[in-house]
Amino acid sequence: MVMMPLFYWIDQYVDTLQRFLGSRAVLAPLLLLLIEEAGVPLIVPGDAVIAYTGYRLSVTHGGVGFWEAFLTAQAAVVAGSTILFYLSRHWGQFIVDKIGAFIFLKEKHIRQAECMFAKYGVFAIIVGRHIPGLRIPITFFAATSGVKYLTFIISTLISTSIWIGFYLTVGKDVGAALHRHLRGYVLLSLVATAAIVVGMILLHLFGLYRSRRQQAE
């Protein structure tokens, strides 16, 4: 019974998103990608947004072309990731320290992870952005670990050129089944988010237990 309202909400959300994507072949993806890259969770990945744009281009004669959509998507990614990069540069370290303290992660381990990311930052950005769910964290950690903005944005452009080109090209095969794909993406995103939250709470409880046990000894 609890699942029925959830599935109804997901269907309503996906319907709204699909209508919005269909209303503007370029402006809708531009806005959605910019929002997502700026760190605002949309529950639907940019992959699906770009793929549907590719589908719309394949069934629409005239108007927007492949390269116009490609450059527009690139501009949205650059703008959004730049916003998140500088926000993370100013506030990210505070968030990392607070999260680390919440799950009882030692400061030296946080610094070691940041040094590792700074050392392999270019490779991590280019490759990591192709892994679903990692685009936003990679921007965040690139900023907090001291990666220079120019290095970050060039690496991002290299990575997104492959990513955008691929999904625009294969998008023509997605269109008819978009609703089913989006619903699966939304459900998976909600499950993953819930798992992360539960995992952090469990880590916090385990840290409390271990801390009290050490004090008792």
Image (spheres, grey):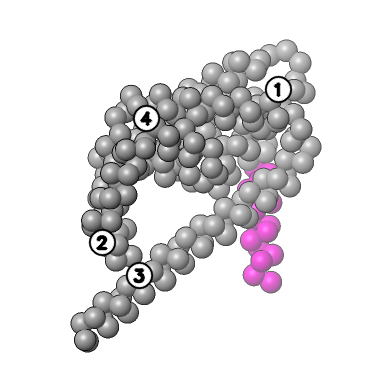
Residue 87 seen in the current view = no
Crowd rating for badge 3 (residues with CA inside 10 Å; few <14, some 14–19, many 20+): some
> Of label 1 and label 2, which has the lower sequence position?
1
Q: Which residue lies furthest to the top in this view?
A: 62
Query: From the viewer's perspective, is the residue at label 1 or at label 3 nearer?
Result: 3
Type of amino acid under label 2: Lys
Local secondary structure at mark 3: helix
Q: Between residues 62 and 145, which one lies in front from this camera angle?
A: 145
Type of amino acid under label 1: Leu
Q: Residue 124: which disc?
A: none
> x%, y% of residue 130?
54, 37
Type of amino acid under label 3: His
Residue at label 1? 57
With 69 as the anchor, is 217 left or right in this view?
left
Local secondary structure at mark 4: helix
Q: Which image quarter is the N terminus in?
A: bottom right
Q: Residue 152: which disc?
A: 4
Disc 1 + disc 2, Cβ < 8 Å: no
Q: How far apart are marks 1 and 2 (CA)?
A: 50 Å
Residue at 77% across, 23% down: 59
Where does the magenta region start and end? 1-16
> Of label 1 and label 3, which has the lower sequence position?
1
> x%, y% of residue 100?
30, 59
